[in-house]
Image (tube, grey):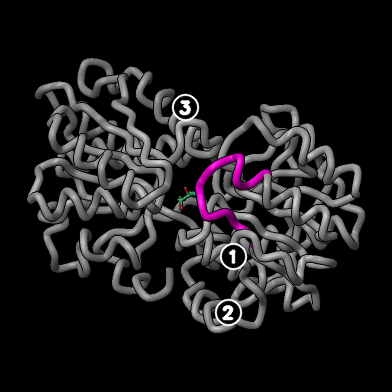
Amino acid sequence: MKNLKKFAALGLVGAMTLGLMGSTSVMAAGDTSEINGSHVFMFKSVGNAFGVIMYDGFSSYMEQVGENSTEKSPAETTVAAQVQLLDEAITQGAKSISISTNGDTGFDEVFAKAQESNIPIVSVDSKASADYRVTHNNQASTADIGAMQVRAAVMIVLGVPFDEADKSMESTVEAALADYDGEEIKIGVLSAGIDTPVQNGWIAEMEKELSKDMYAGKVSPELDKKYGDDEATKSTTQAQAFLAEGNVDVIISPTTVGIAAAGEVLTQAGSDIKLTGLGLPSEMAPYMPASADDDEFSFVCPYMMLWDVSHLGASTAAIQMAIQNDGFDGSEGSTVTMQAWGDYEEETFTAEADEDGGTGVLTGIPYVFDKNNMAEWVDKL
Ligand code: RAM
């Protein structure tokens, strides 16, 4: 709740940090300058607005504490491209590495090299192996994100609006399903890469949610999954495939690239297939209601979710600073203190055991964007 209030007040932070861009360096793939002594931030690929906003938060926090930062993200959303840039960053003397990974294998050699060079690895958004990371910065509970996307998808098919009083949507979807005796609802998923750890974690939670009794016979437990690799063109092709096949009632896209591509395809086609998932209000505005007076169900995406992406970047920087200055080692129960930043007061995060044998810190909560708050967010996130 405390976090949510802060998030609601966040507009200013977003605007402020966006204004700071340019004071730190963003490097194209292959650029080799300015790494030495700099905190390296590597997203899945360049040109993804989610990654841009996250780096913006990361660099503005680093700047606040007097440290240098550099973005070094690959042109292609692949493990191989990340490995190559990681290798360069290590050789060039990066101070730390913060990364959202494109896959869960293939990094061992380069991560071991970072460890040998005493360069701490913190993963954010998409996990790095527990063997090599100090900890993982988790944007919001994986179980909540997975379950909420399924609930939203089902509610949207049934024409049920998001109710602010039931943020998790659990009782709303249960009540809606209890009254439903129509055909089995079919859900498609337009994901990022087939091996991307973060999206696969959410999809596993979607499947868990669908195995609950309340969905039995009413919503298919089988998700129709397609992968757009977080590339706009490929995501568009996959969205077109959903359209051509006509097998699903609703698409969940747990990636900002996929949901925007699907929004465009479904809206242009005037399709009945609905859409929800994880999106940036700025990118999703053309496919969503804009004000409380709108009929949200006349839009392809009546409502969707995300979290404070800028804060996610800043809290990653705070974790790296806690490693550097406060002896934070990511062990269970150890804590990170994040300085006051933007509209946020000082915060403390605690490392908790993760199912993969490593630890993670939870720094955010999922937030639903609907017709009642889109106008407020569209210029900020
Ligand atoms: C995309 C990325 C990222 C994911 C967000 C929601 O930009 O795939 O990993 O967390 O969307």
Q: What residue is disc 3 on?
A: 204
**For residue 306, above or below residue 184:** below
- Residue positioned 20% across, 35% down in the render: 242
Q: Amino acid at mark 2?
A: Met
Task: Write down the quadrant of residue 371 in the picture.
Answer: bottom left
**For residue 362, above or below residue 170:** below
Q: What residue is disc 1 on?
A: 28
Q: Position of residue 72 (x, y in %)?
A: 64, 60
Q: Dot 2, crowdedness within 10 Å: few (<14), some or many (≥20)?
A: some
- Residue positioned 37% across, 55% down in the render: 279
Q: Amino acid at mark 1?
A: Ala
Q: Ligand 1 within 8 A of label 1's CB? A: no
- Residue positioned 72% across, 65% down in the render: 32
Sequence-wise first label, 1 or 2: 2
Q: Are marks 2 and 3 in contact (CB under 8 Å)?
A: no
Describe the element under mark 1 as helix, strand or loop: loop
Label 2 to label 3: alpha-carbon separation = 36 Å
Q: Are marks 1 and 2 in contact (CB under 8 Å)?
A: no
Q: Position of residue 340 (x, y in %)?
A: 71, 73
Q: Magenta segment range?
A: 72-83
Of 195 and 331, nearer the camera is 195
Sequence-wise first label, 1 or 3: 1
